[in-house]
Amino acid sequence: MKHRDDESTAELPAVCKACDVRHGGICQTMSPLQLRELNRHTKRKAIEPGAEVHCQGEPVVSYANVIKGVVKLTKVMADGRQQIVGLQFVPDFIGHPFLKENSLSAEAATEAEICAVSKSALDRMVAATPDLERHLHSQAQAELEEARSWMLTLGRMSAREKVASLLCLVSTHCDPKVDHSLDFELPLSRQDIGDFLGLTIETVSRQITKLRQERLIKVENNRHVTILDLRRLRQAACLGT
């Protein structure tokens, strides 16, 4: 009974109380006592666009939750060519427990903030917390399903459908407070969008211009996007209504 009393009366760390994403990501599965233990091993870091969170091929020494901004995941080939293979939004978890080596590079696509935790500390908590382990497995499954969906996007969709799909993806994730944000900053440059979608930069720009001319979106300052007709944009992306 004493353990339960301790659980119910434990104070959250001040940094956790002030965290906007405490009720998302891995933290949502933890009790106040577990959050206090986690807080002893975490460090919040601001990351400039282009800065690496971790590098492909290096030993895994830490994991992280995305607190602010967008992080892009890339795979580098032996000859130096690279492919953007995913985007991590708030409050996504960066890293895969139980791996000894990073299989991807993670780099800030925008100004970002992460809450980093050492591998050894989180691995101990995962072993002792079934809910946390289940959450991480669920996230890994969700990432797998998203990767399969993106294979369809890259392999079967037209350039128009690919660009519309990316805009719908970003609108869904950029503001975790709502299902879709109709006003957001694109986290990727035109070149990055082309790398992500398997298109040339000219094709990306041409498709964005067409969507703008059709009054589906408005683009300001090259990055600021307003979705004018979400239903039609989803139709353009073959996502239904």
Image (cartoon, rainbow, N blue to C red):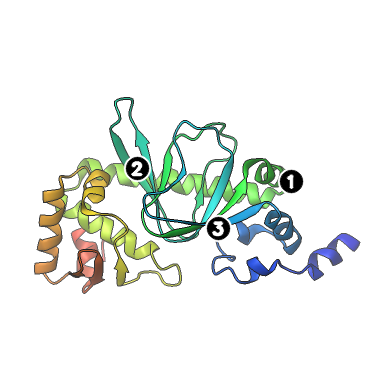
Q: Is residue 35 visible?
A: yes
**How would you rate the neighbour count of disc 1 (Cα within 10 Å): few for under 14, some for 14-19, many for 20 or more?**
few
Drawn side of residue 42 relative to residue 150, left or right = right
Kind of residue at badge 1? Ala
| Residue 225, image quadrant | bottom left
Instruction: Report how far apart the C-alphas of labels 1 and 3 lie in the structure.
Output: 18 Å
Q: CA distance from mark 3 to mark 2?
A: 21 Å
CA neighbours of label 2 inside 10 A, class few (<14), some (14 to 19), many (20+): some
Say which element carries label 2: strand
Residues under numbered marks 3 and 2 in contact, where contact means CB atoms less than 8 Å apart? no
Horizontal side of 157 relative to 62 (left or right) equals left
Task: Specify which label sits upstream in the sequence, 3 or 2.
Answer: 3
Which residue corresponds to mark 2?
Answer: 85
Residue type at mark 3: give it. Gly
Give left or right: position of 161 versus 58: left
**Circle number at residue 128:** 1
> Which residue occupies 61% across, 49% down?
117
Residue behind mark 3: 25
Residue 239 seen by the camera: no
Residue flagged by tag 2: what amino acid is it? Val
Q: Is residue 158 above or below residue 241?
A: above
* Point 26% across, 66% down: residue: 241
Residue 192 placement (x, y as % from top left): 26, 48
User: As rendered, which of 93 and 228 lies closer to the eye?
Assistant: 93
Disc tally is: 3
Task: Please tell me which residue is depicted at 18% across the width and 60% down the height of the picture.
Answer: 236
Between marks 2 and 1, how big is the CA–CA gap?
32 Å
User: Considering only order in the chain, which callout, 1 or 2, is on the residue closer to the N terminus?
Assistant: 2
Q: Where residue 9 sits in the image (x, y, percent)?
A: 81, 70
Q: Is residue 222 above or below residue 188?
A: below
User: Which residue is at the far right?
Assistant: 2
